[in-house]
Amino acid sequence: MNHLFADTTGEDPEEFYLSLKAKLEENHNFPEDYLYKFIFPNDNLKLTELYQIFDRIKYTISTRESKNGKYISASMLAFVLDADQVIELYKKVSAIEGVIML
């Protein structure tokens, strides 16, 4: 289970990413496949933006629409080299409006 984004309210983003890096290095043996999970509005443009971010990385993706069709959940298993790359990808995805990172 991934609790990396639990309770980040009020935290300085740089401190958060430093803490995240330490947790990643402590709990993962890079390079490895890393599971990203996202939820975002059901909009093909947002899905395209997500694909573009992971374009140069080996990954598999599974998507599922919510019951009412308003949202899409995406699970991406991406081969990453280190904690810095995991964080870089999270930062890029966070720039997509409306995406929730789990």
Image: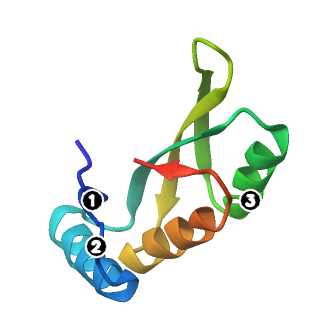
Is the residue under label 3 in contact with that under label 2 (CB below 8 Å)?
no
Could you tell me which secondary element the residue under label 3 belongs to? loop
In the depicted structure, whether residue 81 falls above or below residue 65: below
Could you tell me which secondary element the residue under label 2 belongs to? helix
Is the residue under label 1 in contact with that under label 2 (CB below 8 Å)?
yes
In the depicted structure, whether residue 59 falls above or below residue 20: above
Report the residue at 62% width, 54% height from top.
58
Residue marked by disc 2: 20
In the rendered image, residue 19, in percent from the top left (x then y), is placed at 23, 79
In the depicted structure, whether residue 88 falls above or below residue 102: below
Q: Amino acid at mark 2?
A: Leu
Report the residue at 68% width, 60% height from top.
96
Cα separation, mark 1 vs mark 3, equals 24 Å
Residue marked by disc 1: 4
Quadrant in which residue 72 is drawn = top right
In the rendered image, residue 15, in percent from the top left (x then y), is placed at 29, 86
Quadrant in which residue 89 is drawn = bottom right
**Apparent side of residue 12 relative to residue 38 in the rendered image (left or right):** left
Report the residue at 33% width, 68% height from top.
30
Residue marked by disc 3: 55
Neighbor class of circle 3 (other Cα within 10 Å; few <14, some 14-19, many 20+) is: few
